[in-house]
Image (cartoon, rainbow, N blue to C red):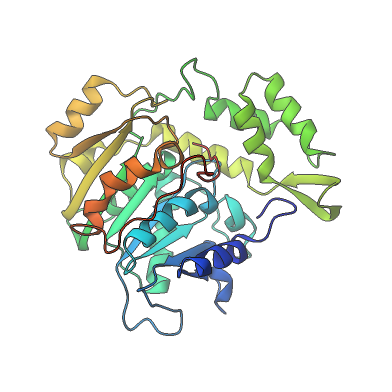
């Protein structure tokens, strides 16, 4: 759900897309129930609709991290379809996150990496979309790996998978150079806060007092919404997401091992990893060696912490661009120096 005082994601995306010749198609335009809330951002040359799926443009899927939502990836998705205007990018709210947490037909437990992957596959089948590229950040990286792992022998079509600052197995999350902002500890803290809460400041204070960074405290309160009958400015407020379900998802993320996928990938899979220069996940030399030894790529993204698509979006774009074609269809429009680079997101 959008935070108080902001336009809905589909409305705001439609306005910004219109100014760039882009087009946005949202889940709420369907008359049928979908397993996840989603938005389809289309380049100026891409044409697809729910009612006419005859000519499906090349499609990529972007999957956010734990405690995030599809808005976290929208700025980078826009960059991709501006550079490759014949493409479209599907953005989803994972189960227990964003608008998916409040859908009438929202997925039920168990909540795991594998079930989150199954949700996206079900949505793709419903939309009759066959993506060429899957991109997942952090928790989302394991989700996209799990999507292709559900086809152990051969993929229906060749797919390029990009895993952004995440590893196939053990999670050694820190959150920053000093080890702060650990996602598991943050989830535990948020679950312990009584809801509804009188103000956003009360949540910010609790997060800061627990030792988390100001950036995380500011981000956390964007996931509050007024309760029915409440005021967008004065509250009271409650969470947009399902924290109990997210706790299960994160536990699954910590224990899910996808090394067998790397060692015996299905036919048709190309798999690459992006390692942030200042990664919070403490990549070990053995991890990188094992990935390369299995025949998959590891690409270093300089000048970036864990939030790769906001810390260095242009560098990330350059790494991913070959998967969208030999070169961009149009010259990539670049944000002027000093201009905002999109919203901060989480793990």
Residue 282 in sight from this viewpoint: yes
Q: Does 247 sit left or right of 53 as displayed? A: right
Q: Does 200 sit left or right of 65 as displayed? A: right
In the picture, residue 319 is in which quadrant? top left
The x and y percentages for residue 331 are 30, 58
Question: Residue visible at 39% across and 43% down?
Answer: 313
Q: Does 212 sit left or right of 300 as displayed? A: right
In the picture, residue 88 is in which quadrant? bottom left
> For this rendering, which residue is in front, 190 or 71?
71
The x and y percentages for residue 23 are 47, 71
55 relative to 68, above or below: below
151 relative to 28, above or below: above
The x and y percentages for residue 253 are 43, 37
In the image as oriented, which residue stretches furthest toward the top? 178
40 relative to 316, above or below: below
The x and y percentages for residue 301 are 31, 34
Q: Does 172 sit left or right of 212 as displayed? A: left
């Amino acid at each position: 759900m959008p935070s108080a005082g902001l336009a809905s994601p589909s409305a705001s995306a439609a306005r910004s897309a219109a100014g760039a010749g882009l087009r946005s198609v949202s889940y709420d335009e369907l008359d049928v129930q979908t397993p996840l809330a989603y938005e389809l951002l289309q380049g100026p040359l891409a044409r697809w609709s729910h009612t006419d799926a005859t000519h499906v443009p090349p499609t990529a899927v972007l999957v956010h991290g734990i405690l995030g939502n599809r808005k976290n990836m929208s700025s980078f998705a826009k960059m991709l379809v501006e550079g490759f205007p014949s493409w479209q990018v599907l953005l989803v709210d994972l189960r227990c996150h964003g608008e998916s947490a409040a859908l009438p037909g929202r997925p039920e437990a168990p909540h795991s990496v594998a079930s989150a992957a199954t949700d996206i596959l079900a949505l793709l089948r419903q939309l009759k979309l066959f993506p060429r590229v899957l991109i997942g950040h952090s928790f989302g990286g394991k989700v996209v790996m799990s999507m292709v792992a559900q086809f152990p022998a051969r993929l229906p079509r060749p797919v390029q998978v990009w895993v952004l600052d995440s590893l196939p197995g053990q999670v050694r999350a820190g959150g920053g150079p000093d080890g702060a902002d650990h996602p598991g500890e943050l989830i535990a803290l948020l679950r312990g806060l009584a809801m509804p809460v009188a103000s956003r400041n009360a949540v910010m204070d609790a997060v800061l007092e627990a030792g988390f960074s100001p950036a995380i405290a500011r981000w956390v309160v964007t996931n509050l919404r007024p309760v029915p009958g409440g005021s967008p400015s004065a509250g009271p407020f409650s969470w947009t997401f399902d924290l109990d379900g997210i706790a299960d998802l994160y536990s699954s993320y910590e224990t899910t091992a996808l090394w067998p996928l790397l060692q015996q990938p299905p036919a048709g899979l190309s798999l690459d990893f992006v390692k942030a220069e200042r990664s919070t996940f403490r990549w070990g030399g053995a991890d990188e060696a094992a990935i390369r030894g299995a025949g998959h790529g590891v690409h270093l993204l300089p000048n970036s912490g864990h939030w790769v698509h906001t810390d260095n979006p242009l560098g990330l774009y350059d790494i991913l661009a070959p998967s969208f074609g030999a070169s961009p269809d149009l010259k990539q429009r670049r944000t002027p120096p000093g201009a905002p680079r999109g919203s901060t997101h989480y793990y």
